[in-house]
Amino acid sequence: MEIRTEPTTKFVVMPPSNMPRQFARLLQDGHGVDVTFQVAGETFAAHRYVLASRSSVFLADLFGPMKDKAMSSILINDMEARVFKAMLYFIYTDTMPDIDKEDALVITQHLLVAADKYDLERLKLMCEHKLCEYIDTRTVATTLALAEQHGCHGLKRACFSFLKSPSHLQEVTEKESFDHLMTSCPSVVKELLAKVAHCP
Amino acid sequence: MEIRTEPTTKFVVMPPSNMPRQFARLLQDGHGVDVTFQVAGETFAAHRYVLASRSSVFLADLFGPMKDKAMSSILINDMEARVFKAMLYFIYTDTMPDIDKEDALVITQHLLVAADKYDLERLKLMCEHKLCEYIDTRTVATTLALAEQHGCHGLKRACFSFLKSPSHLQEVTEKESFDHLMTSCPSVVKELLAKVAHCP
């Protein structure tokens, strides 16, 4: 006689990972940090081995043949402090930090550049995904330039898709940001023309 | 005129997290480790701050008031080496390592005990979930004892559910492992009797 019908595994429910929260706290508390970064007047402390595990660029900077063994403070002069902070948060937690809505577009654009520079492929894709959401007639030219300059194929296709609409295209070409796109990325404008010409 | 129909976000596909793989390598390579454990004749090296971030017990052991500041090697005398190794893997990656099928039941049982001892709640639930899969007439008495001794409510309910089948119950009570359950956890046997008596 067999009256058992319930699968036994249904009795244990797995909660989501708590590692992001634990590593966010490790970063925030700063216990055991062994390197600091000076970024636009702010100081950030971190653990070398965490950075090096996550980014081949930090690995080379902190442990490669060019490293300075005594170096414990590193100057970052091509990034805003809030962008570096967001990048560190990603490195420790593999998630994006909460960003104020009003700053989200600009920070995400800068964070994509930082992710590309530090070889954080997943962060770069997260930024691309976010920037896809922000595509509109006001943002698309700048986003397309960014996608072209940093090899973001998905984001570029999303911009082209948006610009296949004649009304979008017309509105966008009248903006100053489009003039800037023509100057900075003339090849991508030619590519756009070819795509629009083939559009049924 | 609006001919855009595709959502722009569909152009960027997010890959799964690569952090588990990166941190598995950090553990394996052993760069920057600052503590070692002697476990049943084997030595394991790790990063104190990773351990302390993930386990309140390691936090107390490594940084609490009772710690020995000079202590860099810790003796673990209540665990098999392969179980400690699996626990370290979880701590770094938040995932279970691959375990040979033939050893899986025993290692998972021991890993549950280790997870309970080191306050790794998520690992404990992973082990409970795995042990639910292994419930059969051969394993259920031992698993029920383990669930009772380590406060695993879901696993305990899964065992009771299995034992509601009279044929399962009869087969199990004839085994030596059930005699051991009666000796080690008499209260849980009484609980089982009450549940079976109420079974329609």
Image (tube, coloured by chain):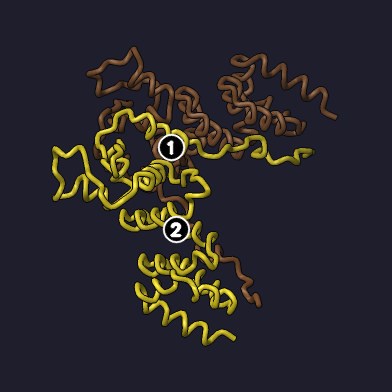
Chain colours: A brown, B yellow
Residue designated by label 2: B125
Indicate the secondary structure of the residue bearing disc 1.
helix
Query: Mark 2 belongs to which subunit?
Result: B
Q: How many marks?
A: 2
Amino acid type indicated by mark 1: Phe
- The crowding category of the residue bearing disc 1, from other C-alpha atoms within 10 Å (few below 14, some 14 to 19, many at least 20), is many
Residue B80 x %, y %: 34, 48
Indicate the secondary structure of the residue bearing disc 2.
helix
Whether residue A180 is situated above or below residue B122 in the rendered picture: above
* Left or right, residue B64 beside residue A92: left
* Left or right, residue B137 beside residue A189: left
Disc 2 to disc 1, C-alpha distance: 26 Å
The quarter of the picture where the N terminus of chain A appears is: bottom right
* Left or right, residue A133 beside residue A117: right
Q: Splitting the image into 4 quarters, where does residue A65 fall?
A: top left
Residue designated by label 1: A90
Residue A146 x %, y %: 57, 24
Whether residue A107 is situated above or below residue B182 in the rendered picture: above
Residue for point 58% across, 38% down: B14
Query: Mark 1 belongs to which subunit?
Result: A
Residue for point 42% across, 54% down: B122
